[in-house]
Amino acid sequence: MRVLVAGCGWLGQAIAAALGARGDRVTGVRRDPARAAALSGLGITPLAADLSDPEALSRLPDDVEAVVACQSAGADGPEPYRDAYVRANQTLLSFARRAPLRAFVYTGSTGVFGQRDGGDVDEGTPPRPRGAAAEVLIEAERLVLGAAPEVPARLVRLSGLYGPGRTGLLERVRTGVLALGPSDGPWMNFCHRDDAVRAVLAALDRGRAGAVYHGSDARPARRREVVEWVAGRLGVRPARREEGGGADGGPDRRVLSDRTREELGFDLSYPSFREGFEELLRGVT
């Protein structure tokens, strides 16, 4: 296929590489012209465009058969989020209506689940956003899913991404930012970049218009389990905070993705955080 990868950064480049490896032709979109130009060295046709600007529509190639919308916000906050996830998708959906596609995949976030009761959330659980940024994420989801079946759009919500070049959690444990204490019980949910790529390509090839999928590993873990395991592998004593425990009022829910893997027919290379971080630890210890 001829695929447009919108937001060809850390995740997008991995998706583009996987597409190219199987023979697809990829155009990668980045806002920054210099970063866009660098894509050519990876075998990706570069296109510098700010998709939040409706005028970018006229610059998109007219021979595209599929779109992967995995753009990210340039900063935190509702307006940068609206640029990246709402306005950019409006441009991409206008493009999709102009040139009928085989598939349109939008990579959303499990951050739309603000539940704090420790319960399970799956592909059919209604989102419960907390905060203005999460509300924007919901707005973007509704925009994309509302375009189906006119556009063959489907949504892949991704949990906390990590992988080569993203080892921040290891440093947070090493430096004591992520600590044991009264608030170490909430669930943490992860997805290795390689498994996120598998989920996206499976949705691209076999997904249904209007469907919601989850890219998340098979074994969510309590925060204390993650801290203790990483500290042990780093050979450090885990930090402890007896008062407050670093509580941030964040979500506490187990993100399930079994239904996605069963429907789309793919397996995980990193079914839990242990397999993924074990591999990363070899490069940082």
Image (cartoon, rainbow, N blue to C red):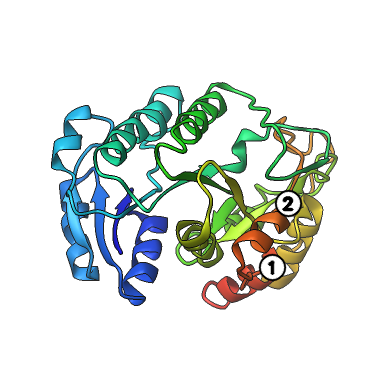
In the rendering, at what x and y percent does residue 121 appear?
A: 75, 42
Q: What residue is rendered at 39% in x and 23% in y?
A: 79
Give the quarter of the image for residue 251: top right
Q: What residue is rendered at 60% in x and 38% in y?
A: 111
Task: Note whether 98 is above or below 160 in the view shown.
Answer: above
Q: Quadrant of the N terminus?
A: bottom left
The residue where tag 2 is placed is 256
Nearest the viewer among 47 and 240 is 47
| SS at badge 2 | loop
User: Decide: marks 2, 1 in contact (CB < 8 A)?
Assistant: no
Task: Note whether 171 is above or below 278 in the view shown.
Answer: above
Type of amino acid at the residue the image marks with label 2: Leu
Give the quarter of the image for residue 279: bottom right
In the rendering, at what x and y percent does residue 285 appear?
A: 58, 74
Q: What residue is rendered at 56% in x and 65% in y?
A: 195
Sequence-wise, the earlier of marks 2 and 1 is 2
The residue where tag 1 is placed is 271
Horizontal arrangement in the rendering, residue 23 relative to residue 149 (left or right):
left
Badge 2 local density, few (<14 within 10 Å), some, or many (20+)? many
Nearest the viewer among 37 and 158 is 158
Task: Note whether 15 is above or below 123 in the view shown.
Answer: below
